Image (cartoon, grey):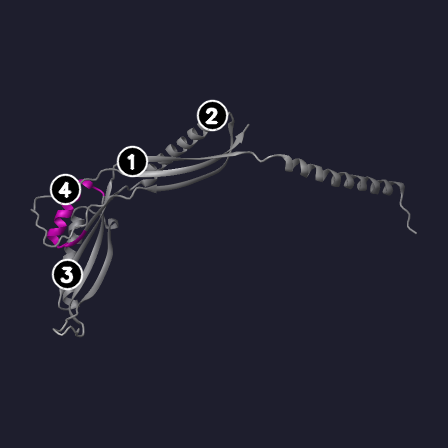
Amino acid sequence: MTSLSPTTGNRIVLAAALAATLLSAAPRAYAQDARTPAPGVISVSGEGVAAVAPDMAVVALTVLREAETARAALDANNEAMAAVLAAMKEEGIAERDLQTGGFSIQPRWVYPQNQNGTTEQPRITGYSVNNTLTVRIRDLDRLGAILDSSVSLGVNQGGDVIFTNDDQDTVRETARLNAIAKAKAKAEAMVEALGVSLGRITQVSENAYSAPPMPMMRAEMAGASAKADSAVPVASGENEYRVTVSVSWEIQQ
């Protein structure tokens, strides 16, 4: 039979007593936490707006050529687009600001109808080739002249112009700070009216967007008549950038 020393026995008794104390205290602590209400939360949002004049225009210039064969249409298109590219470079447009935005070769189909109402087999009467050049123009003072010269060089479709900003992050940061200030002011006014105060921030979210730039009306440039020494009149206006910030605070009584 194994016997326990007095020291060992005392340790067992103490351990058992400690375990019993902890087990009995746990329900009381849990009950106390359960009775403690969660802190109230106030959530508000603020919108910041920053407006700035654009410093860059993005232009889509399309050359469309048609011919009886795909080869002839492509050759004519290549010649015209090469002239447009050369002119853009002469205007000081950097290589990084010139990009082919679309290219297609499409047959031209006809669906002839007989006098009795029946339809004959469709047939190809020719081909059309489209080549679109996207140009970023950083000197807006040259925009009108560039649009005008592009027509003389053979651009006969497109003409969409979108005004934008090269550095949008700086403008959005200004809008963001405005949004945060508005959200905080709104929250402080609410807790003052309620007779409480703001605690720690529990959640922050952001939604940043910019008002869609207003493009100039799409122009069908075929047959456009413009004097060689005139420039297309343009108005760049301002771009708006908006940031909405939502913030939640705990309420302190």
200 on left or right of 104: right
Q: Earlier in the sequence, mark 1 or mark 2?
A: 1
Q: CA distance from mark 1 to mark 4?
A: 23 Å
Q: Bounds of the magenta span?
A: 138-158
Provide the residue designation for mark 2: 193
User: Where residue 147 sits: x, y (%)?
Assistant: 15, 47
Provide the residue designation for mark 3: 65
- The mark lying in front, picked from 2 and 4, is 2
Q: Confirm or deny contact between disc 1 and disc 2 (CB under 8 A).
A: no
Q: Does residue 196 lie above or below 25 as drawn?
A: above
Mark 1, residues whose alpha carbon is within 10 Å: few (<14), some, or many (≥20)?
some
Q: Secondary structure at mark 4?
A: loop
Specify the label residue 138 is tagged with.
Answer: none
Specify the label residue 51 is tagged with.
Answer: 1
User: Where residue 108 sits: x, y (%)?
Assistant: 17, 66
Mark 3, residues whose alpha carbon is within 10 Å: few (<14), some, or many (≥20)?
many
Q: CA distance from mark 1 to mark 3?
A: 41 Å
Q: Earlier in the sequence, mark 2 or mark 4?
A: 2
At x 19% / y 60%, what residue is drawn?
130
31 on left or right of 57: right
157 is within the stretch colored magenta: yes
Provide the residue designation for mark 4: 233
Q: CA distance from mark 3 to mark 4?
A: 27 Å
User: Where residue 20 sits: x, y (%)?
Assistant: 78, 41
Q: Confirm or deny contact between disc 3 and disc 4 (CB under 8 A).
A: no
Amino acid at dot 1: Ala
